[in-house]
Amino acid sequence: MTDKPLITKAARLSVAPMMDWTDRHCRYLHRLLSSNALLYTEMVTAPALVRGGALHLLEFSPEEHPVALQLGGSDPEELAQAAMLGAEAGYDEINLNCGCPSDRVQSGTFGAVLMKDPARVADCVAAMRAAVRVEVTVKCRIGVDEQTPEEVLPDFLDRIRAAGCQRVTIHARKAWLQGLSPKENRDIPPLDYELVHRMKGAFPDMHISINGGIASLAEARAQLEAGLDGVMIGRAAYHQPTDILAEADPLIFGTGAAADPVDVVRKMLPYIDRHLAAGGRLHQITRHMLGLFAGRPGARGWRRALSEGAVRDHAGPEVVLEALARVAPDAVAAPAN
């Protein structure tokens, strides 16, 4: 488990929790690209853990640290129990989802709809804080539907701070719970970065990260230099992981050297071997590797070789090496580090 000062530093740059994307295989890959960035699980619902006993959802590799568990729920007692399970599993942080706008999340009375009930969110945070020693954080929107963000966001932050939350990530868009799909909610509502910066001024004691629309390390650095404590990147980190994460350690954290995606591929091979030996399928891992060479010569061949080869029966590491030959033919025969 990572201590609080280190995880607070890690939160300078984090990869957003993304359903169906940031599973344990994705996080292992991302950790090879950056030793320092904070990684998040997909959202795991508290009922699935507490009532459903789905503890397999908590499995992760020790190499993933620092890694945070994002929970979805709205019942303080149940969230406290789920937080305890997460802490016992070894997560460095427990995060409460108050930003997801999907219909499934709304029907469970959690996610972005919780922006309408900040008192309940505060109760949830307080219960989780009382149950675990690891840090409890919140990811939220600037508001939902017809709310006025300039009014609701300060009240929301004030309440969760009073409940013991010192670190929050703000997706700088409203969420429209009716009329827009989850995908549209990531693009259509306008971004309001200035409001998030004003919140940092109003809550200087809180660690505030910004999320939404940030697609490069240069943009992330600009947000940090403007006074925010952290930046969370989602889709860009997934689709162009090398562009976002390979230089994060030297450029964002001031340590280490940039990662070489070719070396990262070779370092993934032992992990792939272990996964296959345990009965897994190659495509469960390689689907997260498709963007490693985005924008580089041979990237299309890399993606095609992986996409077509990894789904075949008995596909193994040789598929990855064949794909790597499309972008780095001289590196395939080189020994792994």
Image (cartoon, grey):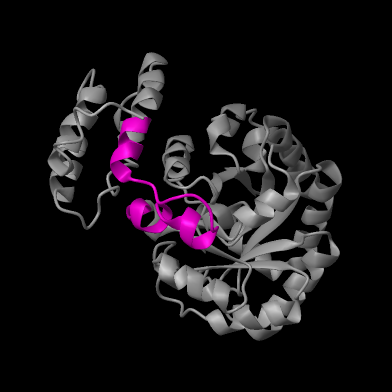
Q: Is residue 101 left or right of residue 78?
A: left
Q: Is residue 228 above or below residue 312?
A: below
Q: Is residue 137 above or below residue 318?
A: below
Q: Residue at x 73, y 44 (%)?
A: 3
Q: Is residue 309 highlighted in magenta? A: no
How many numbered marks are there?
0
Q: Is residue 263 highlighted in magenta? A: yes
Q: Position of residue 293 (x, y in %)?
A: 25, 49
Q: Quadrant of residue 209?
A: bottom right
Q: Is residue 82 visible?
A: yes
Q: Is residue 172 visible?
A: no
Q: Nearer the viewer, residue 270 or 49?
A: 270
Q: Is residue 209 left or right of residue 79?
A: left
Q: Residue at x 77, y 60 (%)?
A: 165
Magenta range is: 239-267
Q: Position of residue 112 (x, y in %)?
A: 60, 63
Q: Nearer the viewer, residue 142 or 277?
A: 277
Q: Residue at x 83, y 54 (%)?
A: 126
Q: Is residue 263 left or right of residue 224?
A: left
Q: Position of residue 62 (x, y in %)?
A: 58, 31
Q: Position of residue 79 (x, y in %)?
A: 74, 45
Image quarter (top left, top right, bottom left or bottom right) of the C terminus: top left
Q: Residue at x 60, y 82 (%)?
A: 195
Image quarter (top left, top right, bottom left or bottom right) of the N terminus: top right
Q: Quadrant of residue 141?
A: bottom right
Q: Is residue 140 left or right of residue 296?
A: right
Q: Magenta region's main secondary structure?
A: helix
